[in-house]
Image: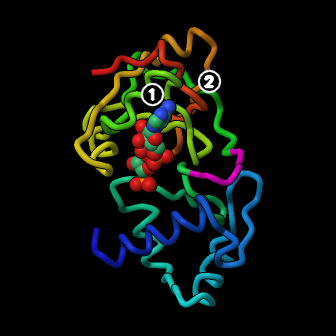
């Protein structure tokens, strides 16, 4: 992505996942806000985003962080504010992956994967994506998650619109540490 797209993506992620109040907008219970309301609010706060740039972020980026439906926009995942994305429980692939770093392993061994500041733990369906997620924090460590075991045990998983898998907690018994 160009620098401009990256910085706009970060602003939108911040507003739509964490701090809609920072630009004076309110999300509905499923995390949506009308596109025109959001663009007007961003412009008012000195962060104008053109519809063309927004279109590129919605359709044309690697990650598909944002969803647009019927004139409204929301973040596909990553929220810290409580929203109900209204995703149906989904049957996961047998194995999912979680990218992290070595310094978090002692905590993960004891408590499993916890959502921390977000509403959900994020899991990836492929190793490379998980490694990229871990690499945001240092040398990546990729954990193997027994997703089918979680499903059989009745733990609910959801697949966000951009393919990221979400769950509230992964107990240690479903995690294989490297
Ligand atoms: C760790 C990015 C200690 C966990 C990515 C992770 C992703 C624990 C960190 C999305 C723990 C939380 C989410 C425990 C979990 N003890 N550490 N019990 N349980 N952790 O950022 O998965 O670019 O909230 O391993 O691509 O890193 O923003 O989660 O390292 O999809 O679109 O606590 O963010 O997407 O970190 O990343 P995060 P994440 P975007």
Q: Is mark 2 on a helix, strand or loop?
A: loop
Tell me which secondary structure the magenta stretch mostly adopts.
loop
Q: Where is residue 39 in the image (x, y as percent from the top left)?
A: 60, 80
Residue 108 image label: 1
Label 1 CB-ligand 1 distance < 8 A: yes
Q: Is mark 1 on a helix, strand or loop?
A: helix
Residue 103 placement, left or right of 43: left
Image point 54% across, 33% down: which residue? 114
Residue 157 image label: none
Q: What is the span of residues highlighted in magenta in the rendered image?
A: 79-84
Q: In which quarter of the image is ligand 1?
A: top left
Of marks 2 and 1, the one in the foreground: 1
Image point 59% across, 52% down: which residue? 79
Q: Residues within 10 Å of mark 1 (few under 14, many from 20)?
A: some
Q: How far apart are marks 2 and 1 (CA)?
A: 19 Å
Q: How crowded is mark 2: few (under 14 residues within 10 Å), some or many (20 or more)?
A: some
Image point 49% across, 11% down: which residue? 149
Of the image marks 2 and 1, the number of the one nearer the N terminus: 1
Tell me if residue 55 can be seen.
Answer: yes
Q: Quadrant of residue 163?
A: top left
Q: Quadrant of residue 1?
A: bottom left
Q: Where is residue 167 in the image (x, y as percent from the top left)?
A: 57, 31
Q: Position of residue 162 (x, y in %)?
A: 46, 46
Residue bearing mark 2: 156
Tell me if residue 64 can be seen.
Answer: no
């Amino acid at each position: 992505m160009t620098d401009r797209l990256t910085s706009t993506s970060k602003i939108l992620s911040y507003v739509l996942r964490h701090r809609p109040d920072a630009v004076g907008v309110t999300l509905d219970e499923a995390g949506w806000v009308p596109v025109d309301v959001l663009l007007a609010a961003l412009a008012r706060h000195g962060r104008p985003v053109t519809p063309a740039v927004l279109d590129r972020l919605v359709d044309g980026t690697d990650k598909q962080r944002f969803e647009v439906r019927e004139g409204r926009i929301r973040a596909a995942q990553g929220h810290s504010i409580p929203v109900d994305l209204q995703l149906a429980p989904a049957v996961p692939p047998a194995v999912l992956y979680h990218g992290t770093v070595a310094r978090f392993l002692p905590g993960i061994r004891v408590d499993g994967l916890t959502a921390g500041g977000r509403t959900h733990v994020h899991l990836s369906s492929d190793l490379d994506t998980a490694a990229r997620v871990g690499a945001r924090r240092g040398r990546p460590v990729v954990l193997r998650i027994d997703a089918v075991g979680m499903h059989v045990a009745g733990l609910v998983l959801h697949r966000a619109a951009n393919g990221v898998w979400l769950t509230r907690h992964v107990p240690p018994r479903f995690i294989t540490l490297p």
